[in-house]
Image (cartoon, grey):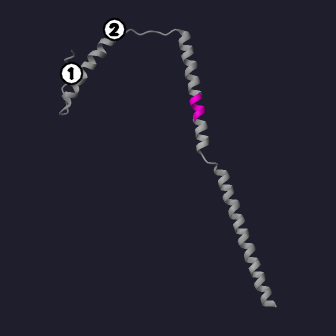
Amino acid sequence: MNTNLPSPAIPGESTRLENVAPLQDVAEHLKRTLRPVTPASEYRARLGAGLRMAAHHHHAQRLLIRTRAQPHWGWLVGAAAVGSAAGLAAILLRSRQTHHAAARQVTQ
């Protein structure tokens, strides 16, 4: 068991440090037992290709989702502009018709 734990600077921290001690023992045991391994070049090549493919699929999926989620602002703005222009034209025509009708009644 690891007994060289630092003294706690915060009250109540000693319980936490006591809970961590067994984990530190396991970590030290694993460090002594396990040795680094260099994977075969074929494995590394397959892993690299698989990771690149996964990244490509992830990127493509995000593009599709982003494209669907964003409204087509150009169409919306264009439709609003056309609607506003048509409304303004209707108001002007109606105003002219009313003005001309009133002018005809006055001249008769």
Q: Position of residue 37 (x, y in %)?
A: 44, 9
Element on which disc 1 rests:
loop
Mark 2: few/some/many CA within 10 Å (<14, 14-19, 20+) = few
Q: Tag 2: residue type?
A: Thr
Q: Position of residue 40 (x, y in %)?
A: 52, 8
In the figure, residue 81 lies in which quadrant?
bottom right
State the residue position of label 2. Answer: 33
Q: Tag 1: residue type?
A: Leu
The mark closer to the camera, 2 or 1, is 2
Q: Quadrant of the C terminus?
A: bottom right
Which numbered disc flags the more N-terminal residue, 2 or 1?
1
User: How far apart are labels 2 and 1 at the CA level?
Assistant: 22 Å
Question: Which of the labelled discs sits on residue 16, or is there none?
Answer: none
Q: In the displayed structure, would residue 87 be above or below residue 32?
A: below
Magenta stretch: helix, strand or loop mostly: helix
State the residue position of label 1. Answer: 5
Q: Position of residue 52 (x, y in %)?
A: 57, 23
102 with respect to 43 (left or right): right
81 with respect to 6 (left or right): right
Which range of residues does the magenta coloring cover?
Answer: 57-61
Q: Quadrant of the N terminus?
A: top left
